[in-house]
Image (tube, rainbow, N blue to C red):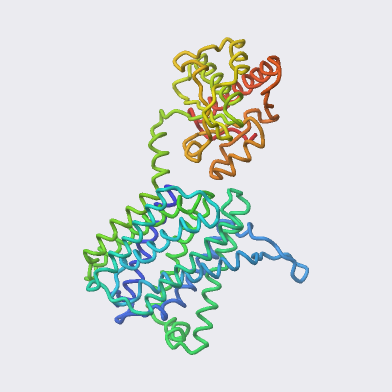
Amino acid sequence: MGWLTFGYFVSYIPYAMLVKALASGVTPLSPRPISGYEMLPASVLGQIAAMMAFLGVSGRWRHMRRSGIGGRRIPTAGRETVTAGFFTSLIIGATTMNYTFVGVSILFMLLMMRGGVLILSPLIDRAGNRPVMKHSWLALFLSVVAVSVALGDVNSYHLTPAAVLSVLVYLVGYLGRFKIMGRVAKNGIVVTDRRFFVEEHVAAPVWLALLLGAGALAGQPQLGAGFTTFLGTPAALGAAGIGVAYEVLFVFASLIYLDRREYTWGVPAWAFASLMSGLVASYALAWLAGLPPPGNSQLIALVFGVGAAAALSCPSAVLWWRTRGTGAACRVLFVCGGNTCRSPMAEVIAWAEAAEAGVAHAFRFSSAGLATPMPARAMAPGARSALAELGLRRVPGRGNPRRHRARSVTLELCRVSSVIYCMTRAHRDRVIAMAPEAEARTLRLDANHDIPDPEGQSPEAYRRCAEHIQRSVRGRLCELAESSGACGTPPGRG
């Protein structure tokens, strides 16, 4: 995510600068300002050319589905990805248009657009039954404040009805795109995500070209000029460069959104990067071309916008802080049903095995249950007896198993855990349903078999369960120790 965000930041600066410079008439390519309608046809043609080059060179076009036409199987797109491409075309066209309006700065329009998407993100997550944390609601509030502050200083901008309509079209585009993306992709299945990425990628600029062409045929004079006389001018090269720049940032942005975690996880990185790009582009144009810099109210609103992005990023920042540094401990979570038998036995056994191997400093073991213990229950007597038979009445430095109290699995526990070992396949499925982003690091403790619950059975059943857990823990610890670092990529899925 870090590299994607950085790539988006870098690629957005030339895009925003080029659009505003052409629209303001401060480039050597044109002595007059170019309207958004006039530059959009050349821009979308430049994006289509860059898109075809990218998909061809990278080979990603192979991820498209195939349909038989005339005895040949040719690449095609599904109905939902074509629809998503339509909504994305609205975003592409409106974004470029938003920077061409007179009387508004790059930063002002960015605040309107990004503030709107920051507000939409937790609402879309909530509608899609994705978990939304309290930080998201704080971010929504800060986004509303940012937009209100930017709009509050009526002397620093001139917002025409066309500009308002363009921002609304932009937000409708994101609402439709995110809803479809969340339904048919964004699920961590590589094949599905790649197919959606490529098919939407192809459909979006084609849709935009069709919409612009329809507008030109309907008699919009500037669009008509954009498809005819404008294409023969030097400024058309600059407009085509806008399309190429947008293609680059479009790749980075799409990959950020397709991360399987909720939108309130990826959107803040995207919003923060673009707000910083807008700030750099605004002052670069003020220095190079003498365009007015952003007003004070816009800079104050920027602070609230960045605060909203920071609030949304809070869970990820906490996770990074807790696991920062090369010497960070590998956080291993054991999960069972009630956290009174199998998972606490696994926790005690893991501490003992790690201490014996001299690697206890590299790990942090914990356990939790999928049931809600009310009140918190102690470890089952049969489990304590089984541990005693293994010589684990007490783990050095880790207390007495008799002091264990059951607790429930939470979304935050899943997020901060480097790897999650479940006792059964059913437990794994429930953890993934709770925290979809943890799927790749949620495994069965025994990759080949469930570890059955001995509750209510004989002491022999508890002993067999403890031995089963001990064998499995030893194998998993060996795998973790052999992976890159104390907590590298978890071994194969169980």
Residue 227 location, x and y as percent?
Answer: 47, 83
Above or below 242: residue 351: above
Figure label count: 0
Q: Position of residue 381 (x, y in %)?
A: 60, 17
> Front-most of 303 and 123?
123
Residue 460 left/right relative to 61: right
Depth check: 223 or 272 in front? 272
- Furthest toward the right, the residue is 71
Residue at 46% across, 16% down: 399
Residue 229, percent from left and from top: 43, 86
Residue ID at (38%, 37%): 321
180 in relation to 441, above or below: below
Q: Quadrant of residue 160?
A: bottom left
Q: Could you tell whether 356 is left or right of 145 in the image?
A: right
- The reply, left or right, for residue 391 in relation to residue 426 is left
The answer to which quarter of the image holds residue 318 is top left
Which percent across, then down, holds residue 73?
73, 64
Quadrant holding the C terminus: top right
145 above or below 133? below
The residue furthest front is 375
Please tell me which residue lies in front, 263 or 246.
263
